[in-house]
Amino acid sequence: MAKRGRYQTAVGQKQVIPGSKEENFQGQNTWAGLGDETTQADPYFYSYSHFGIHEEMIKDTVRTETYMKAIVQNPELFRGKVVLDVGCGTGILSIFASRAGAAHVYGIDAAEVALQARQIVEDNGLTEKVTIIKGKVEEVQLPVGQVDIIISEWMGYFLLYESMLESLIFARDKWLAPDGIMLPDTAKLYLVGVEDAEYKESKVDFWDSVYGVNMSMIKPLVVTEPIVDVVEAHAIATNETLVYSMDLKTVRNEETQFAAEYSLTAIKNENLHALVAWFDVEFNHGSKKFRISTGPTKRYTHWKQTVFYLHEVLPMMSGEVLKGSLAVRKNPKHNRDIDIKISYHFDGVKWSYHDALYYKLK
């Protein structure tokens, strides 16, 4: 697995699961024992005012070229239609939609980059076809009562991080015509088990002596830090499993906080060190279908994968099964952070393992 750097996320608290295999994922009981920090200012829109993040996203060819193809290679969808681009950034998707034949495109973004997007639209001779509106989706007004198509690149790490999906759902419910379409229109979240001994050992054992200072008390917290980075395909040790799926035309905000069971079967004799999550989104409208996959066996994307380390190394024989549950909620004090609880249930030839770990993406 590639060495990981600046994409480390936050810590959770390890707790031993109750003896019963039945768990209540509704309400606060699921999160008993998980503390919340004091409220901080939301840096989300500020971060998207930096051009470096837009450069990274645009240079992600899987991301940008898939959106471009899904739009310009399906002109029958866009011809003469009114389009809304939620979180338009530099306006590149708005311009693609205009070039595909849209009657008019409205792009909304609360970050300062919206000001540059207006100039980009003008520089490309599209001021009569594309309108960029600076402001939060929940606060702006459109010059039209409804739109025919909503496009958006809303996905965050672990699919749901950053909570932009809330704004997309708001825009859909307020402006999308009854027979309108969403692009992309579906999203799916997957889990797989991986072997990652070398990096896990260096990551954990590092804290035993830091320039001669014993910091080993940090080790239990470090183990439960989810990390966003590239996972190499050869590290995969189990089959993959689908744990969450949504239809963007119908999903409700409350459905983005969920609990799901999973089952992973070892595909070889290997030590399991972590579970890895990734997502796919699909463009199923039009004559040509497209998909973005952020999985470890696919081409690189800036979303990479999200790695959740187990507290213990788990020896698995080929055919043995790890079962458990994945629960996801928004952090009560920090709306754009995500609390994640993963339970583990395993009874194998060499080892039995029953545990539950809390993680936080922030």
Image: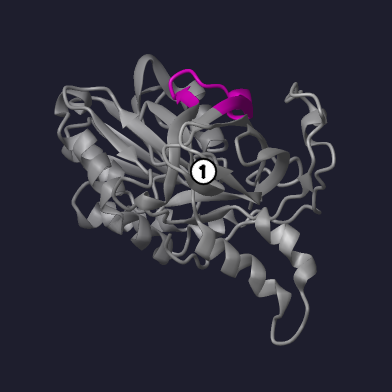
**Left or right: where 118 falls relative to 236:** left
Quadrant in the picture for residue 177:
top left
Assess disc 1: are there few (<14), some (14-19) or many (≥20) residues with their C-alpha within 10 Å of its C-alpha: many
Q: Relative to the observer, which residue lies in front, 124 or 312?
A: 312
- Most distant residue in the top direction: 178
Amino acid carrying mark 1 in the image: Phe
Q: Residue 311: percent from the left, percent from the top?
A: 68, 51
> Does residue 127 appear in the picture of this structure?
no
- Most distant residue in the bottom direction: 212
Q: Relative to the observer, which residue lies in front, 266 or 206?
A: 266
Q: Residue 345: percent from the left, percent from the top?
A: 66, 32
| Label 1 element class | loop
Q: Relative to the observer, which residue lies in front, 3 or 286?
A: 3
> Does residue 115 appear in the picture of this structure?
yes
How many marks the image carries: the answer is: 1
Residue 261 on the magenta segment: yes
Q: Which residue lies at the image location 49% right of the left edge and 51% below the top edge?
A: 195
Tag 1 residue:
158
Q: Which residue lies at the image location 22% right of the left edge and 27% below the top edge?
A: 289
Q: Residue 216: percent from the left, percent from the top?
A: 76, 70
Q: Residue 82: percent from the left, percent from the top?
A: 30, 27
Is 138 rendered above or below residue 42? above
**Magenta part of the protein: which range?**
244-262
- Most distant residue in the front direction: 349
